[in-house]
Amino acid sequence: MATTTLSGQEFNRMQFESLLKKRFFFTESFEIYRTAPNYKGDNRGLFDYGPPGCALLANIVNEWRRHFVIEENMLELDCTAITPEAVLKTSGHVDRFADWMCRDPVKGEFLRADHLIQTVLETRIASSRSASADSKTKLDESTVQKYEAILAKIDNYDGPELGKLIKALDIRNPNGNGEVEEPTAFNLMFKSTIGPRSAAPIFFRPETAQGQFLNFRKLLDYCQGSMPFASACIGKSYRNEISPRSGLLRVREFLMAEIEHFVDPESNKSHERFSEVEQIELPFLSKQTQLSGKTTIETASIGSAVRSKLVDNETLGYFLARIYLFLVKIGADPKKIRFRQHLENEMAHYACDCWDAELLTSYGWIECVGCADRSAFDLTVHSKATGTPLTVKENLPEPLEIVEWKASLERKLLGPRFRKDARKIEAAIEALDQDSLEKLAAELAEKTVVSVPTAETLADGKTMVELSGDICSIKKVTRIENTREYTPNVIEPSFGVGRILYSILEHVYWYRPQDTAREVLSLPILTAPTKLLLVPLSNHPIFKPVVKSLGSRLRSMGIANNLDASSVSIGKRYARNDELGTPLAITVDFDTMKDGSITLRDRDSTTQVRASEIQILEAVKSLVSGSETWKEISQRLPAFTGQAQGT
Amino acid sequence: MATTTLSGQEFNRMQFESLLKKRFFFTESFEIYRTAPNYKGDNRGLFDYGPPGCALLANIVNEWRRHFVIEENMLELDCTAITPEAVLKTSGHVDRFADWMCRDPVKGEFLRADHLIQTVLETRIASSRSASADSKTKLDESTVQKYEAILAKIDNYDGPELGKLIKALDIRNPNGNGEVEEPTAFNLMFKSTIGPRSAAPIFFRPETAQGQFLNFRKLLDYCQGSMPFASACIGKSYRNEISPRSGLLRVREFLMAEIEHFVDPESNKSHERFSEVEQIELPFLSKQTQLSGKTTIETASIGSAVRSKLVDNETLGYFLARIYLFLVKIGADPKKIRFRQHLENEMAHYACDCWDAELLTSYGWIECVGCADRSAFDLTVHSKATGTPLTVKENLPEPLEIVEWKASLERKLLGPRFRKDARKIEAAIEALDQDSLEKLAAELAEKTVVSVPTAETLADGKTMVELSGDICSIKKVTRIENTREYTPNVIEPSFGVGRILYSILEHVYWYRPQDTAREVLSLPILTAPTKLLLVPLSNHPIFKPVVKSLGSRLRSMGIANNLDASSVSIGKRYARNDELGTPLAITVDFDTMKDGSITLRDRDSTTQVRASEIQILEAVKSLVSGSETWKEISQRLPAFTGQAQGT
């Protein structure tokens, strides 16, 4: 997909990714083994972060913790990745956490079915549109529309449907053009066993959520029973992707940051702080739009989206707005963010509503944050599987007087009269709802006998029993309830940190107009790996003491800085740090030795100011804390144009 | 082992651990599944950290990053836990990363052999010493000494030796007293496969080190070739322990923080900053002391320890001192730290020297940090396995003129004269060292013929060949070398963060003398999960606005605080936070509403001061930053003795 850089230039992914590798933002894991003799491993989808990538990751995680956990007093947990099979059996992952894959019997390759269709159809559309298209590759407009409609809802097909599409559209493995076999389900979890017996299967978690659900009771105790509350967990998860591609976007080991917000389902899922965000305008791609085969984005305030029921409830809406603010703050381009609603088949069967925050990259729109209303599903299934109540018991503000119909059976007569059917009749009476009871009460009063349907067949082969008034009475009774017990619903915002990191790097990338090789990563100061480059004009020993003392002063101010006293030209050193996304540079030159003044350079504009050490350090401090912008600084401090500015 | 609390009281581990669980520092993972019907999983050795544990962990990790990574400009990496089999085959883990276990055929239990011996011998010694010892349990002094000598070097035995001890000392499974089978090796890594083929085995890493070694070339490039340098990695590692016990101390999934310091072996492993630490006194338990069956700790400055060669080199010594400073800073009791040198069998065969920082707990001395000189082992084996040079090439400051003896063979004559032996003779000449060459040169000058030994047997059945001057010449030649190539050695400080966390919690635990149930965790402000408790005197609505504004002011100062406006007594709320290790509390009462003054309480002394909001917030700031102590604050601000102080 053709995207443009921050400054509207054509985006060249090869050049961009080679920059990230050159500056060691990341690298393929175990790369030196790939070319080792007789190596048979599969390194795909495994990446290591180098020093700048690691610092960027840490800065994103820290801001996440501040923006969500600390701001909302969430309860952070650190749960194990190792998870017993029983837990993931309950959650449905053992049976259903799978992708559909097709085997190409000739090449011996395994392909993810939906990705295969996507690649082939996108290629067909692109070839048809290319200038060199001939009668064979040219598609008529209706075919293009059909393909685009399929692509728009590609996540909506299950395995058999994908199989039908592959047959109907004659989709083949692009590598060799061979036909592929029927899609089969492949479970994406890494399996192992624990302990010396090898009898206890475990999985490495595919998400951090289960650990949070299982600790629900302890969390509720910890926050002294006050609802709603949220837990959070940051940690690695593992998915055995069939055929990872797309660099950092589809990996087998990745950092997740997940929130589980527990809420009373009878609260209307309203949110205390919703008014703080309701004016924020968000870009939506609704379910309806997608099902009509379109991808038009509609902008609306989150307030109106919740009112119109486009977004199911306030809590979900609150998180969508907070996610948007977070993404923009850490460097995402607001024009490259959208919220896409899940289609029915794509959504877990228990979820009420689900939205993905997607970021536009050269790989297309990428799901970076999922935000789902999972209803009471998780707590209910784990509670059932373990026999542990995962509920909230609340004292009612006032005792509740409940008037209701109640049926009672005269057991002394029931047994002798109905023998083996007695239990079935008891169950039938138990199963009656208030409406039925009211009707039967009237019938009983009138006829002194009632007919009650039974779920199980009785000895006489019927599923209906007649009960007389001596054995069955139905009366209106009053009972007092002091507490209310309920299973909370869960709203789950779930962040793929690596995907966010990669997408943001694409968003902040551009190159100086005068030279495509002069690349810049305009990361915000907040997330930039290093805030400041410290450079002496040359590696002359005279600069050493000043530079050393500046370095330790900056460190004591808590500002991550990087000294480059190498012998290459100052322009080259600036350029290297533009590529690392370092927003500021302090330069020490011969004038510094005379008057103590130093210069401060802005990465994006390459302009510089010159002032005393104290003034410059103060400027750095207010830039880093966000209290001043470069524009403000450059207006109040004298400009400097003396040296190579690395433009 | 009997230990005492911070204030010298008897330490009760049951009470201590139940406090940690009650306050949700940690919990057994998947606890609600343990009692689930038909559950067959093995949860042992898996723990989740709750909110205070998680915050304590994060604070320790942050301080680690500051103390080591930032202070020394280390290059931090984030490497995958998933590791291809080939990598761990090279490193030796596939073949050797195992513990010895014994099966009890009757109980069907698996026991770690060294732990079995340890438990049984410790029990025998304890029974012998107990007041109720009879002639059967009473041991003579020489037996006790023998047992203690075995215990002192329990890590020095391999599997067959452990088997012999078990037989010789008639050691049986304490559960049922059954005899156990011969020890067998059990590999401790979790194995799985990657990709849809199941043909590519992987392990979940047992340490973070390998990822750092494999990225050596990229790291060297990143720091522009300057040696020495260090990389660092913080991340989860996994070990399938045979039979985990000892709570948080022996777990199957744990956080490690590891440093790989790469150093030129010809630099004498000296360290630029050694002079900054050489005066620091450290408690040592040397190899010699242990082999003599003793555990006496000797205190010496790290400077003198390196000079006396007790510690092999300055770099290793520098890290031991820095580790000590780190442990004390985050809360370890200096009296409960020792550095134990590894015994020969315990140390990897390639290591030159290895020291463990051990912390004393109720489980005994626990290895919390390992600090090994791994020589050039890791880089050498990975380089050999992959064919990738993992070396440093340095330009020599001045070209080196090397004068050396060189032998050359006249190939035109060699082939015809020696036929099949020619290759063997060439190899023999290649293998000659300078001394031999010098001797042979003299021989040749004198006799015009030399005898050269061959490694392989020649056609005539001899391993010596006579070469005449026409075919072999030996001369002094001069060559110029401009670069030097070498494989760096590695010093590896490796931290088990969970073990450190647990040990420190034991170190800071005590209870108020007047009431054993009034427990306190005297964590330093630096690592305390929450710095400050914010309490209104009661839940009267009048206090709400003041408390809210104080909370947001503290948050903007970056001080993690916790509001407790629940209806329980203020003493109970103080006590709850003493148990959470919260060092400070601000209280808002009716006087606050009159004159704006608030009180500040110190957890350890339970004393309070009262002053204006501005003064108190300033005091909090200087306490949190470490610029003032409570003693200083309480001397300059007026004492307050009005309310329940939670003493």
Image (cartoon, coloured by chain):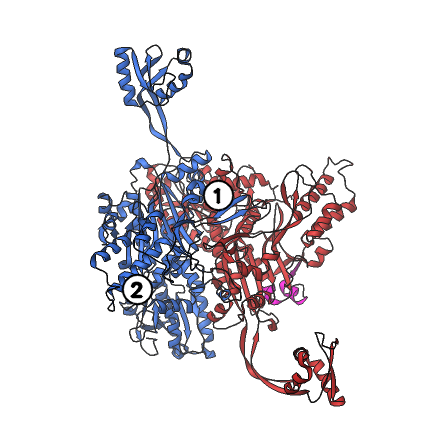
Chain colours: A red, B blue
Report which residue position mark 2 lands on: B629
**Which secondary structure lies at badge 2?**
loop
Q: Residues within 10 Å of mark 2 (few under 14, many from 20)?
A: few
Compared to residue B28, the image places residue B429 above or below, namely above
Q: In the figure, is residue B37 to the left or right of B293?
A: right
The residue wearing badge 1 is B85
Residue B179 locus on image (x, y percent): 37, 57
Q: Is residue A300 magenta?
A: yes
Q: Residue at x 76, y 48 (%)?
A: A145
Residue B281: say if magenta: no
Which of the labelled discs sits on residue A532, or is there none? none
Give the left or right position of residue A160, taking residue A516 as reference.
Answer: right
Q: Nearer the viewer, residue A564 or B127?
A: B127
The answer to whether residue B224 is visible is no
Q: Which residues are magenta?
A: A299-318
Query: Image quadrant of residue A409?
Result: bottom right
Q: Are marks 2 and 1 in contact (CB under 8 Å)?
A: no
The amino acid on which the numbered mark 1 sits, given as a three-letter code, is: Glu
Q: Which quadrant is the N terminus of chain A positioned in?
A: top right
Name the chain letter of the residue that bears numbered label 2: B
